[in-house]
Amino acid sequence: MPEFPRVDDALLQRLDVPIPRYTSYPTAPVWSEKVGRRAYSAALAEAGKRTEAPLSLYLHIPFCRERCSFCGCNVVISRSTAGADAYLGALVREMDAAAELLGDRRSVSQIHWGGGTPTFLEERQIESLWTAITRRFRVLPDAEVAIEIDPKVTTLSQLTLLRKLGFNRMSMGVQDLDPAVQEAISRIQTAEKTREMLDGARALGFRGINFDLIYGLPRQTPASWARTIAQVIEMSPDRLAVYAFAHVPEVRPNQKRLPLSELPRGADKLELFRIAWEAFTSAGYRPIGMDHFARPDDELAEAQARRALTRNFQGYSVRAASDVVAFGVSAISDVGGVYAQNTHSIARYKDAIADGELATERGFACTADDVRRRGIITQLMCNFHVDLGASAAQEFGGELARLGALEAEGLVSVKGAEIEVTPLGRIFVRNVASIFDAHLCVGQRLFSRAV
C-alpha cells in the first residue's frame, strides 16, 4: 500500500474550503419546496411500472436518549419509548401510501434503519415495524439489511432479535474512545461496551460490521487518536468509516456547546486522518471511497477493485437499488431522478400522514444533465476513475480545462476522456468532484470543509 501523500501548507490552504460531501447530486441546498408531494407521488407511480427492479428502503428512527454535542443528525430526545408508538404508526401509514403508488413493484435488495438510534426502540416495537415492512414489501434472500446502533443503549437481546428477523449488517457509532474527547462531545462509551456489542454481533452471524469514527473532534491529539485507532484495530471490525468532523453550528446549534478552542483544524486535523489512514492500511484494511476502510475480502473492497462500487444516502454499497424509498421524519427518497425530503418537524410529519398525505417538504427533479453529472461524480467519489466518453470535449470542455489546474497540483491524471484520481487527489476527492457540479456556489458555509 502506498504511503499517505504529503500535503504542503499552501496546497492545504487552497483546497480546505467548504465543499459538499456529495451524498447526493445536486446537493440539498439547491432543493426547493417547488418539488413536493405531487412530484414525489408521480415519481413513485412511474417507478411502479419498473416491476422487476428491486428497491432500497430507508427508515428514519429519530429518537435518542440524549443529544451528543457533536451530532449533525435530525433527532428527537426522549427518555421514554412509549412516545415512539405514535411515530411508528405514522411510519407504517406512510409505507401504505408509498406501496399503493408503487403497485406491484415490491421487491427489496437493501433496507437501512438509521437515526437517531434505532435500538432506542423496545423489542416489541422493532418486531412490529419489521412485520409491517415484510407485509408490504418482499425482502430478497440476498438483501443487505442494515441497522445503526449505539452500543451504550443496545442489548444483546436486541441484537438476537434483529438477527432473527433478518438483519445482517450493522454500523456502530464509536467516534473516539478517549475519555477526554468523549467528555467534550457529551458521549461516554467504554471500549469494553463497544467490544461486547462487536463480539455479540459476530457470534450471531452479522457481517460487514462497521465502526463510525470521527476525526477533528475537540481534545483529539495525535497521541490520543493513535491510542483509539490501536484499540479499534485490536477489535478488528470488518469496515470503518472515518469521517471528518463537520462543524456547522449554523445548521446544528447543539454544536455550539463544544469547546471550540480545542478543535483541531487545518494541518492538525489532516494529521489525524493521516494517522488513521496509515494505521488501518498497515493493518491490512483497504481505503474505500474518500473516508472508509474495509478488509480486502469485504465485498466493498472487492467492488472497488472492479470499479463497481456505488453509494447512496445510506453509504457505500454493492446492493443499492436505482430507487430509494425513504420513510420517516426528514427522510430522503431518490426515485426516478426525483429527490424528495420529508419535513424535519415530527409534528408536521404526523399531521401530514394523518391527513392521508405524503410528508414531502422539498425536493429536486433532475434534468438529463444532472443525471449525467451525478453518474460522473459517483464514479469519482467511489472508484476514483471515470471515462467521460467520446463526446467529452464537447460536453465538458470547461470542466476539463479546470481539471488541468488540479492535474498540475497532482490531484488527477487526465488522459483524453479518462480521469484518474491520484493518491493525493483521494484526500481531496470532494474538490475533484466539484468540478462537475453545475449548481455549486464555492465556499458556501452550509458545507463542511474539505478537511
Image (tube, grey):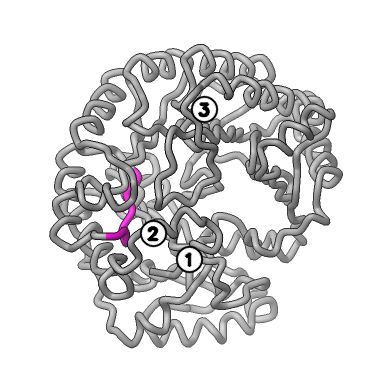
Residue shown at 35% from the left, 84% from the top:
11
Specify the amino acid type for callout 2.
Phe
Q: CA distance from mark 2 to mark 1?
A: 8 Å
Specify the amino acid type for callout 3: Ala
| Left or right placement of residue 243 versus residue 182 in this view | right
Q: CA distance from mark 3 to mark 1?
A: 33 Å
| Residue kind at label 1, given as amino acid type | Ser
The spot of residue 72 in percent (x, y) is 48, 51
Q: Quadrant of residue 83?
A: top right
Q: Quadrant of the N terminus?
A: bottom left
- Magenta region includes residue 215: yes
Label 2 or label 3, whichever lies nearer to me, is 2
Q: Are marks 2 and 1 in contact (CB under 8 Å)?
A: yes
User: In terms of secondary structure, where does tag 3 sit?
Assistant: strand
Q: Residue 143's mark?
A: 3
- First along the sequence among labels 2 and 1: 2
Residue nearest the viewer, comparing 372 with 252 = 252
Q: Position of residue 381 (x, y in %)?
A: 48, 60
Q: Is residue 35 above or below residue 101?
A: below
- Residue 183 is situated, as x and y percent measured from the top left of the image, at 27, 48
| Any part of residue 424 in sight | yes
Question: Circle 1 is placed at which residue position?
Answer: 448
